[in-house]
Amino acid sequence: MKRSDCCLSVLMQESGFYVRARSSSSVTRVFGSCEGDVDLSDGLGGASELAFIKEPSDVIAVRDRPLMLDCQVEGEGPITITWRRNGVPVPLVARAAVLDNGTLLILNFQKRRDGDESDAGEYDCAAQNRYGLIISRKAHVQLASLPKFHTHPESMSVDEGGVARFYCAVSGVPEANITWERNRTTLNTDDNRYTLLPNGILHITGVRRVDSGTYRCVAKNIANTRYSHEAQLFVTVAANRLYKEPVILSGPQNLTVNVHQTAILECIATGNPRPIVSWSRLDGRSIGVEGIQVLGSGNLIISDVSVQHSGVYVCSANRPGTRMRRTALGRLVVQAPPEFLQWPQSVSKPAGSSAVFTCQAQGVPDPHLIWLKNGKILTPGDHVKLTNNNSTLAVTRITAEDEAIYQCIAENGAGTNQASARLAVSQSTELPEAPQDLTVTPLSTTSLQMRWKQPEPHVTDRIIGYVLHIRKLGEPDRSELQEAVSKDTFDHEFSNLEPATTFSIYVKAYSPLGASQQSNTVITTTLGGVPSMPSFFTKVLNSTAMQVFWELPSKPGRVEGFKLSHRMLPQQKFGTEERFPGHINTHTISNLESAGVYEIQLAAFNGNGDSISNKRLVSLAETGKSVKDTAAGQSVCNCHQDADGSMTGIVVGIHIGMACIIFCALFLMFGYRHSFFCNKGTKGDWSLSGGSGSQRDSTAKDATICTAADAIELTPQGVTAEHQAATGQCEVMIEPLHPPGTNMGTSTGTG
């Protein structure tokens, strides 16, 4: 037997054929190659395939200006294009329309001040024809904006010949272009002492007195222009230029960018003599030269970054002519949107067969894959399986409802990508009929014999073989085992099975075009005994209802189901028996008599019979309480007795309890007489005592059958009367009470 998550390749021989496990998850490919039953995909390509030519892209819109988002598709018409924003259809009002080529036109982009209504968001377009529906990638549409600076330059004092660094930051959409002004005049960048980094940093090396003044940032984009606060630069006259060790004033920061963007790694150092700044990678790899430049005194600029540029970069500030240096590290992470390595391919399959779609994508970070069916998220089920981190979609036992366009969506932090394929279901009349009259008979504790009806000769001619499906009851479908047999075989023996285990079995017939519908499913159990007695407990919900819970076996196949019944005391017979499959473990019993006492009976069963019944009593007066099994799993009643025996035990118990209560009450009300004769003595065993040896023997015999008139004296064993007189001893005489009018007899002992 081979597991169903294998693609089964049949090796045809003159004497028949056998099944070999290989890969994938198609069961119905048993009688063909691993690429499919029959290639029916002709005609699926070309114009009939619905696909995107151009998808919408991320865009930044300007308020009160037009916005256009592209969506061009090809395929068999008619094709309907619709647009969604944040998953909701875009209302086609006076200022929004879909052009003939599928483009979405918004005449004047809006962003209301209340923030609730905005044209910004995630847009996608959906294209639909008679074969199905596909959805484009999501395009992020942002409103151009430029708020106030959130970081302003700060005033500083620098020695003449030293290094000055100003920094400002603003969050603009799109990213703002930042320039600098000194004394409200644009800074002359022709002086190579000034280094302006695109991220709002200004370096001034070899500071002179003429550099004194007020500095501010100017940020500008398509939305606005902003000015930062002003900062003052004071240049002081340095004393004698003394030796100063290298110091890195600002090192590289951890940075995350997308591919094709520009990465800026800052490194500014000071010292006397002026240190030399160099760059390296921590992993020892070469930084390269293409797209690499050093700006100013040591800032590293990497243009058009790729994934290979990711790593830890080391900035070193070295004192000239020595090995003395200072270092600073920064990590560069380059993200890449998903790219497909393998696309799903459109196929045509007959009903009852299987189809497998494969979708593999790469990106940084690793993309997450989801599947859509006609634009809706695909939910795995009994015949739809997703495996290999969602890269493989298998559709088994195909029906007309499975005909659709399936899309693989790859997403990560850098973007999304999509690929689609269509599953066409061919309604072939050449598929064989489902096998009829399947029966299964237990042969032993480890084997089962299955048989099915031999079809008519004209049907057999189209059949190339049968596949038998078996799994333990309660196991998932993916654990199903299969065996293939020849077209001339109509019975088969499963061996090496587990004893006393219940199985679900069915069979399919195969032709060159695919599989038939499955036969009737048979539930049967190998020989080996009945299930063990189930343990259960109850919970009273209210005065007329209770809930019963029972434990399921730890291994699948141990039970076929459970039988539950109940009766209200003092009725002699249990009510109608209810049956539950082996995966159900709770049931609510309602419409009971208010505050009644009920006996619950539960048994497990399989093909070999019923287990011992477990019974318990439940009083509906105990609302909200749970009644559980004892540690040994025994019920409160004797489950081996019949109903009459149970009732007799209950009645006897009640009478005994009442008698004890009455006796104790009388004993306390009327009191008792007692005498203590205590002398010094030793401890010993107590026995019946009498006046003499012969009397003692006689008394001992009479003590086995005591009457109401008897008195019992306890004396230490092995001690004679004389010894008792010589040594201290204690006698306790207990005389029972006698009803009025009766004689009272006493036994005396030596004192």
Image: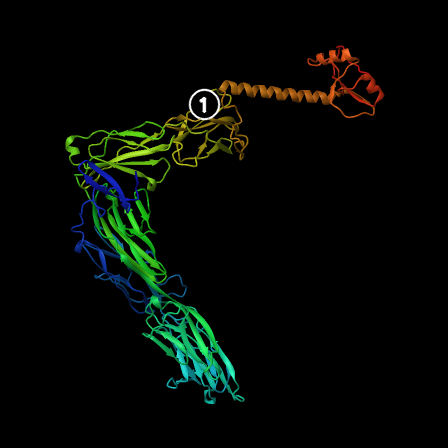
Q: Is 600 on the left or on the right of 488, as rendered? A: right
Residue furthest right as drawn: 726
Could you tell me residue 742's position as x and y percent?
75, 10
Where 469 sits versus 395, above or below? Answer: above
Residue at the image point whose x is 63% and y is 21% from the top: 658
- Mark 1 — residue? 574
Q: Can residue 169 be seen in this view?
A: no
User: Depth check: 431 or 232 in front?
Assistant: 431
Name the image colouring. Answer: rainbow
Residue 300 spot, x, y in % from top left:
39, 75
The quadrant in which residue 96 appears is: bottom left
Residue 560 shows up from this direction: yes
Within 10 Å of the Cα at label 1, are there few (<14), some (14-19), or many (20+) other Cα atoms?
A: some
Task: Classify the position of the C terminus by image quarter.
Answer: top right
* Element on which disc 1 rests: loop
Answer left or right for 50 relative to 267: left
Quarter of the image for the N terminus: give it. top left
Tell me which amino acid carries mark 1.
Phe
Q: Quadrant of residue 288?
A: bottom left
231 sits to left or right of 192: right
Q: Where is residue 343 in the image (x, y as percent from the top left)?
A: 26, 55
Residue 170 lies in what quarter of the image? bottom left
**Residue 705 versus residue 96 in the image, above or below:** above
Which x, y percent locates residue 200? 42, 76
The residue sitting at 33% across, 54% down in the picture is: 369
Pick whichever, 222 or 561, lies toward us. Answer: 561
User: How many numbered dots are placed on residues in this image?
Assistant: 1
